[in-house]
Image (tube, rainbow, N blue to C red):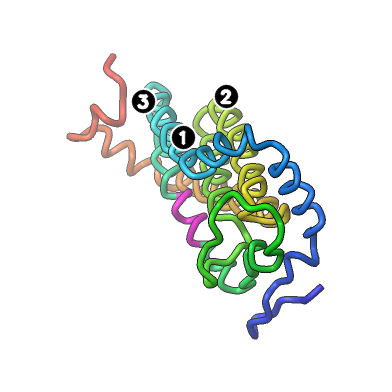
């Protein structure tokens, strides 16, 4: 297995779990009835996480300034997780499995050469939202976590990522999402409290 360094050596994803990736894509090859549904979900399912954040904001309107702060921080945490993930991609420069294993079954079109695989952006953002919502509403966070796992699985099923790409993304998104939201809840509550007493009050608190 090729090691990766800051000098630019690419991570050899196929050498890590290319066999497991092939098992998943073989499963996809033999479940054509599922291909369309998974393809639609992996492409557009990320929009569900915007809905989850909106629901979190709605819930937070009745839960006080600390919870509202966490709800407002969730989208920021998702963007921050994406940026961190993109930085990791630029270090490891792992070629997509469709290039390393071109004969494996592929549902999603192979992306450009400079669109690297490790870690998965889709999974990172989903995991960041699920982790951020843990500080808003745990039941909502649990629901988002289920769809995060489905998103991770779908990225491998369509051939876009190796299993280790999505596993790493779950860690990156989860850690960054929770840390960013916890930090906001720790330090930004006074700001949200002041904003709640102004013209933004209808957006930040529920009517009595």
Q: Is residue 65 above or below residue 206?
A: below
- Residue depicted at 23% across the width and 27% down the height: 202
The residue beneath circle 3 is 61
Closer to the eye: label 3 or 1: 1
The residue beneath circle 2 is 139
Q: Which secondary structure lies at badge 2? A: helix
Which is nearer the N-term, disc 3 or disc 1? 1
From this viewpoint, is residue 182 visible?
no
Start-end of magenta stretch: 77-83
If the image is split into quadrants, where does the N terminus sit? Answer: bottom right
Q: Are marks 3 and 1 in contact (CB under 8 Å)?
A: no
Inspect the magenta stretch and tell me whether residue 81 lies in it. Answer: yes
Q: Is residue 99 above or below residue 121?
A: below
Distance Cα–Cα, label 3 vs label 1:
20 Å
Could you say where residue 62 lies in the image, as x and y percent from the top left? 38, 21
Which is nearer the N-term, disc 2 or disc 1? 1
Inspect the magenta stretch and tell me whether residue 1 lies in it. Answer: no
Few, some or many C-alpha atoms within 10 Å of disc 2 (few <14, some 14-19, many ≥20)? few
Distance Cα–Cα, label 2 vs label 1:
16 Å
Distance Cα–Cα, label 2 vs label 3:
16 Å
- Residue depicted at 31% across the width and 26% down the height: 205
From this viewpoint, is residue 9 visible?
yes
If the image is split into quadrants, where does the C terminus sit? Answer: top left
Q: Which secondary structure lies at badge 1? A: helix
- Residue depicted at 55% across the width and 37% down the height: 36
Residue found farthest to the left? 199
Q: Are marks 2 and 3 in contact (CB under 8 Å)?
A: no
Q: Quadrant of residue 91?
A: bottom right
The residue beneath circle 1 is 48
Q: Quadrant of residue 65?
A: top left
Could you say where residue 106 lies in the image, as x and y percent from the top left? 63, 53
């Amino acid at each position: 297995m090729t090691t990766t360094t800051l000098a630019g050596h690419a991570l050899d994803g196929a050498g890590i779990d290319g066999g497991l990736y092939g098992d998943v894509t073989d499963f996809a090859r033999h479940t054509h009835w599922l291909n369309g549904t998974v393809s639609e979900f992996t492409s557009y399912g990320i929009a569900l996480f915007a809905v989850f954040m909106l629901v979190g904001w709605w819930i937070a309107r009745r839960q006080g300034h600390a919870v509202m702060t966490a709800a407002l921080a969730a989208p920021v945490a998702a963007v921050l997780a994406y940026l961190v993930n993109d930085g990791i991609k630029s270090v490891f420069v792992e070629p997509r499995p469709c290039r390393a294993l071109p004969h494996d079954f592929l549902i999603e079109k192979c992306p450009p050469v400079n669109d690297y695989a490790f870690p998965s952006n889709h999974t990172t953002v989903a995991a960041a939202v699920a982790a951020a919502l843990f500080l808003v509403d745990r039941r909502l966070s649990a629901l988002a976590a289920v769809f995060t796992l489905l998103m991770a699985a779908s990225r491998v099923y369509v051939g876009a990522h190796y299993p280790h790409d999505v596993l790493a993304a779950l860690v990156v998104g989860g850690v960054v999402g929770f840390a960013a939201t916890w930090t906001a809840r720790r330090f930004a509550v006074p700001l949200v409290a002041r904003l709640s007493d102004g013209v933004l009050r209808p957006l930040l608190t529920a009517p009595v």
